[in-house]
Image (cartoon, grey):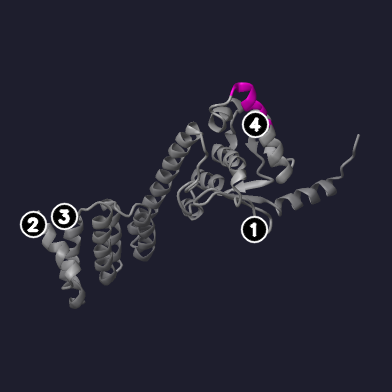
Amino acid sequence: MRYTSAKSHSTDLYRRRTHLYRLRTFSILALAGPDDDAVLGKNGHQRRRLALLAILAAADEQGRSRDQLLPLLWPEATQSHARHSLEQLLYAIRMSIDEDVFAGVDPLRLNPMVVSSDVGEFRSALRRGDLEAAVEEYRGPFLDGFYLSDALEFDRWLDAERTSLERKYTGALERLSQSAEAVQDYATAVRWRRKLAETDPVSSRNATGFIRALMNAGDHTAALQYAQHYEAVLAQELGTRVGRSVANLVAEVCANTHNGRLADSPGVSNILEGAAQR
């Protein structure tokens, strides 16, 4: 029987803790090594390895059973062929990352001592109520631009997961904005409202929230500039114009701003005239 001293066990644990791999799922999917170099993500043949890691990262501590993974990754294959493909995939990942990369056998989970993930830390921050830490983890849509060929079930899972995570992100931003506004910390409110506006650039609700935040912060020039930007985005993306809620805010800013040149600019005039004609 092999004897492992407490000291050697502690040393090995420390080594593992300081040599985590990092799975980045928000925006471009990639696995970074201890030196922040890309281990997986550069080559097309690695897509299913990354897909499996992303599925397990999103599953958090619950993990995924093998029977759940098969239709996601090999929907057209027979049961026996899909199981064989899964075993090969698990082996390839162990060999390219670490033999202890997975925790458990069925269900499968990622071993947090080997691989951490932004989506895992996002969920963890939400659970403990640290909204600011959660939104800092979110760098863009979940698995942005990622796909698997001939894997319709994976596409459906991805769409649902992406929507759910974005909803949690915007909900956290909304609560952060409201908390800042409640204590009249308008500079911080502008920060969170800007992120909300960036998440959905055509949302009237987000636009009015951001414009109002800029007004509360005393930055009337930026409020009018953003209103013009929003008008241009709507025209380009939807072929429409701003609604009355935005136009009313623009009129309010114009009545209070000292920047007459901006208030009288063609862009601002178009917003007010367009609202008056509706």
Can residue 101 be seen in the rendering of this structure?
Answer: no
* Residue located 25% across and 70% down the image: 220
**For the stretch drawn in magenta, what is the main secondary structure?**
helix
Mark closest to the chain's N terminus, 4 or 1: 1
Q: Secondary structure at mark 2?
A: helix
Position of residue 63 relative to residue 244, above or below, is above
The residues tagged by marks 4 and 1 sit, at their Cα atoms, a distance apart of: 27 Å
Residue type marked 4 = Leu
Which residue is under mark 1?
Answer: 36
In this rendering, the label closer to the viewer, 1 or 3: 1
Residue count near mark 3 (Cα–Cα under 10 Å), binned few <14, some 14–19, many ≥20: some
At numbered mark 4, what does the secondary structure look like: helix, strand or loop? helix
Front in this rendered view, residue 123 or 226: 226
Q: Is residue 25 left or right of residue 9?
A: left
Pair 2/4: label in front: 4
- Residue 86, which numbered label? 4
The extreme left residue here reads 277
On the image, the x and y values in percent for residue 160 come to 43, 37
Magenta segment range? Answer: 78-87
Evaluate if marks 3 and 2 touch, with contact meaning CB atoms under 8 Å apart.
Answer: no
> Who is closer to the viewer here, 26 or 103?
26
The image's mark for residue 277 is 2
Q: Is residue 86 magenta?
A: yes
> Residue tagged by mark 3?
244
Left or right side of 142 for 231: left
Q: N-terminal of the two: label 2 or label 1?
A: 1
